[in-house]
Image (tube, rainbow, N blue to C red):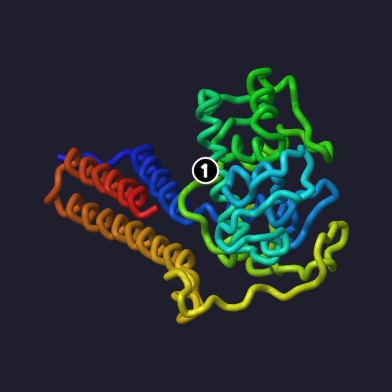
Amino acid sequence: MQRPSPSRPFFGLLLYFSLIALVWAGVTYADFLHDLAYRESSLNATKVNKFGYAGLFQMGEAAMVDAGYYKSDGTAVNDWRGKFTGKNGINSLADFTNNPDAQVKAIADYQAVQWKVIQNLGLTKYLGQTINGVEITQSGLLAGAHLVGYGGLQKYLTSNGMNDVKDGNGTPISQYIQKFGGYRVGGPAPSYAAVAGAAGGSGMPVGSATVTTPGTSSGSVSTAPTYSLPAAPSMDALPSEAFYNNTGYQMGDVSDLITKILAASLFLWLVWMMLGTWKSFNDGRLALAQFKTDIIRALIILMLGIALIQ
């Protein structure tokens, strides 16, 4: 009697989920921030545009207030006449534009606040829906709010895309929701080196980003004279800074590397387990039903493992 064999659709499904697991493991929050910074400032940490938006992510006073870096002077313009809080050593606009690592931390803090506001406004109900041919995702909502604020995002969603709100430069929110949709977001802020070196989806070569000296970027408005990047932290620096001084690597970089190694190990384990299970099945030591059960169980363990190490 001929033994039954696993169906082709089953193996297709197995390969599909395996590829999803591998791709998911290789995508980081840094990719989203890389592309956002590339779109906003061409990864120029010193850029201050004509509207007063500053840094890699072109953050304004309101965003900096939400992120905990700034106390507003009560005006609606980005004149930066308020007071900086000193968070992460940022006491002035010059400190901010000369510290790309602080800028990455600031945007991560800001996006955490953004997401809470988006949830409080009830806009998460649009996740998974399609508006103007584009699926609404978490990263798309964050990017849309970054461009035109919470009010503009709410108008766009509640009008089913009919009110395509634009920013001061005439960029429609629909463009940002589409361009930045589908990224993985959230979690601890990566280092600036991780953001600058991320592959992202902008086509910018890995590691090609540079920090421009104030006053030299074309098309930007410099609000301070030329000055050097901050000096190395003192001996009483934070543990993360001390680690960087001693090793030359950011803790976030090491964490990303460990995550990728663990994810790759899990994937290799799955391949090894599948080959062993297939051999047992071919040798007649494993029934077809048990073969499928073992494979499905391995896939579940793989996905849970990847979720835990993220």
Number of marks present in the image shown: 1
Q: Position of residue 103 (x, y in %)?
A: 62, 57
Indicate whether 19 appears above or below 239: above
Indicate whether 130 appears above or below 231: above
Q: In the picture provided, is 221 more to the left or to the right than 72?
A: right
Depth order, front residue of 84/157: 84
Q: In the picture provided, is 116 more to the left or to the right than 277?
A: right
**Residue positioned most to the top:** 159
Q: Does residue 128 show up? A: no
> Crowding at label 1, few (<14), some or many (≥20) Cα neighbours within 10 Å?
some
Q: Position of residue 65 (x, y in %)?
A: 62, 45
Question: Which residue shows up at 33% across the image and 62% down it?
Answer: 265
Q: In the picture provided, is 267 more to the left or to the right than 45?
A: left
Q: Quadrant of the N terminus?
A: top left
Q: Which quarter of the figure has residue 263?
A: bottom left
Q: Position of residue 131 (x, y in %)?
A: 64, 24
Question: Which residue shows up at 60% across the image and 35% down it?
Answer: 141
| Residue denoted by label 1 | 112
Indicate whether 240 appears above or below 64: below
Q: Amino acid at mark 1?
A: Ala
